[in-house]
Image: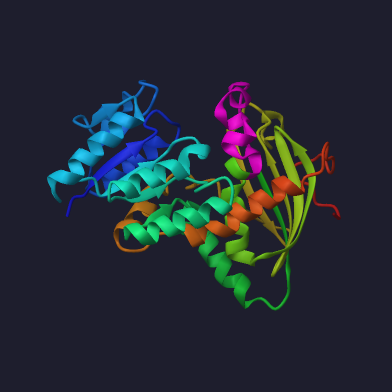
Amino acid sequence: MSRNFALLGAAGFVAPRHLQAIRATGNRLVAACDPHDAVGILDRYFLDAKFFTEVERFDRHLEKARRLGEADRVHYVSICTPNYLHDAHVRLALRVNAHAICEKPLVINPWNLDQLAELERESARRVYTVLQLRYLPQLQRLRDEVRDRARRADVVLSYVTRRGPWYRISWKGSEAKSGGLPTNIGVHFFDLLQWIFGAPRTCEVHIAEPERWSGFLELERADVRWYLSTRAADLPAGPDGPPAFRSLAIDGEELEFSPGFTDLHTVVYEDVLAGGGFGIEDARPSVELAHRIRTTAPAGARGPLHPFFRGAR
């Protein structure tokens, strides 16, 4: 059965992955919204989708559709907006009797999860979040292997993705709007680490700068040194090489998982539509850890300068 989708944040970087997922799963986009009107991408996927530049008119359109009946109402709202708007837009979805599929992070601050959980119960609709790394087969295998190990692992997580000056000028460069690097970029990896190696026992921050963060985590089954950077100079192949590098080193053995990282949204949608998917409580550990890292960081933190540091902490 084809379902009706609406999308918030149609001009955003990640929106095409959601548009592709909606189409690939045999559903249709009936409405989209973004304050910016550079959304020609919609024509590639859904030529007839209604478009709004004001969320109030978008909200009104969805409410009107809800009252027309099952064939016309929106069943899912996909949320690709700036991080600080996510919880408000999830509430909009629930209010028009739709499920929400929200990009990471579900919220910036963990206490907002409690309110969403209460609203989810009241609405009898679900709030899903995109934790696509959990679907990578090599990481699923690693999780199974780790659970069978008798000893703790020594882990180094490195993630470098180049960003130009625009990044700091945009909402992504504002900690209040994005949560900074630990939340905007790190949240996927903090979810991954806990999903594989268990909950954190201790947390240290060594570097806390606008373009790079690093630290140490003692998890239930691993000691983890992590590094996040948006500096092109930190890429292993240099500024002119591949634009991103993602790596896990476990007991000195490299597990490179860049391939496939951007191709998993359709898998996420297939799981949600089949009755699975990840929700509020799945998102909670990574939201809480990213918040803990932000609030742990000492002013002017300094530490190991090399992104692939292998020395003692």
The residue drawn where x is 57% and y is 53% is 111
Q: Position of residue 191 (x, y in %)?
A: 58, 56
Segment colored magenta: 160-182
The relative height of residue 271 versus residue 55 in the rendered view (above or below) is below
Q: Nearer the viewer, residue 96 or 254?
A: 96
The relative height of residue 196 versus residue 2 in the rendered view (above or below) is below
Q: Where is residue 297 in the image (x, y as percent from the top left)?
A: 77, 45
Residue 185 in view (yes/no):
no
The residue drawn where x is 55% and y is 58% is 284
Residue 169 is one of the magenta-drawn residues: yes
Q: Nearer the viewer, residue 157 or 56?
A: 56
Image quadrant containing the N terminus? bottom left
Q: Where is residue 253 in the image (x, y as percent from the top left)?
A: 69, 59
Image quadrant containing the C terminus? bottom right
> Is residue 65 toward the left or the right of residue 265 in the image?
left
Residue 301 in view (yes/no):
yes
